[in-house]
């Protein structure tokens, strides 16, 4: 596992990576074609979010002090979000699901969240 903090333009990015492999799908096996990990993730992500929500997230302009949580797939994203929220809120658990207090950038619009609103606690986590 690799944990990295990077400051870009006043925003702090937390990155957690764990190398992971994925088997090709049955269709790929039939066609004797193996998809790359990036192709698999792109295909999966196209099914998760609307084009409009992805575009909204990609056009989001962070504020100074915003913290982006960036983890490799299936490597503890929700756990990392929970830890960071607990640190910034001194343990507040007044929410039903962690994405209610930490929006996903490319999924926020689909969930009815505005990325530009202030958060209850600081720094803003995205």
Image (cartoon, rainbow, N blue to C red):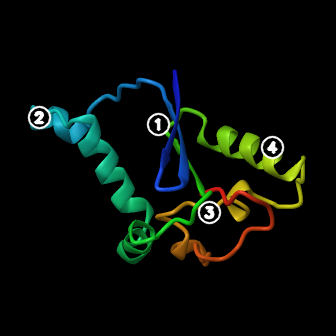
Mark 4 secondary-structure assignment: helix
The residue identified by callout 1 is 72
Asked if the residues shown at circle 4 and circle 1 are in contact, with their CB atoms under 8 angstroms apart, the answer is no
Residue 80, position as x, y percentages in the image? 66, 39
Q: Nearer the viewer, mark 3 or mark 2?
A: 3
Mark 1 secondary-structure assignment: loop
Dot 2 or dot 1: first in sequence order is 2
Q: Nearer the viewer, residue 17 or 78?
A: 17
The residue identified by callout 3 is 103
Q: Nearer the viewer, residue 74 or 119?
A: 119
Asked if the residues shown at circle 2 and circle 1 are in contact, with their CB atoms under 8 angstroms apart, the answer is no
Give the alpha-carbon distance from disc 3 to disc 4, as whole Å: 17 Å
Q: Nearer the viewer, residue 3 or 28?
A: 3
Q: Quadrant of the C terminus?
A: bottom right
Mark 2 secondary-structure assignment: loop
Give the alpha-carbon distance from disc 4 to disc 1, as whole Å: 21 Å
Please give left or right for residue 14 compared with residue 89 in the image. Answer: left
Dot 1 or dot 3: first in sequence order is 1
Numbered label attached to residue 105: none
Name the residue: 40% across, 68% down: 54
Dot 3 or dot 4: first in sequence order is 4
The residue identified by callout 4 is 87
The residue identified by callout 2 is 33
Give the alpha-carbon distance from disc 2 to disc 4, as whole Å: 45 Å
Asked if the residues shown at circle 3 and circle 2 are in contact, with their CB atoms under 8 angstroms apart, the answer is no
């Amino acid at each position: 596992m690799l944990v990295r903090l990077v400051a870009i333009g006043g925003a702090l990015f937390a990155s957690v990576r764990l190398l992971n492999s994925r088997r090709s799908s049955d269709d790929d096996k039939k066609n004797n074609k193996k998809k790359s990990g990036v192709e698999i993730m792109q295909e999966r992500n196209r099914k998760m979010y609307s084009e409009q929500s992805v575009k909204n997230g990609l056009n989001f302009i962070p504020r100074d002090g915003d913290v982006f949580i960036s983890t490799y797939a299936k490597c503890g994203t929700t756990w990392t979000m929970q830890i960071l929220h607990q640190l910034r809120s001194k343990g507040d658990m007044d929410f039903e699901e962690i994405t209610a207090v930490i929006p996903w950038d490319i999924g926020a619009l689909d969930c009815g969240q505005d990325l530009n609103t202030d958060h209850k606690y600081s720094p803003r986590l995205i």
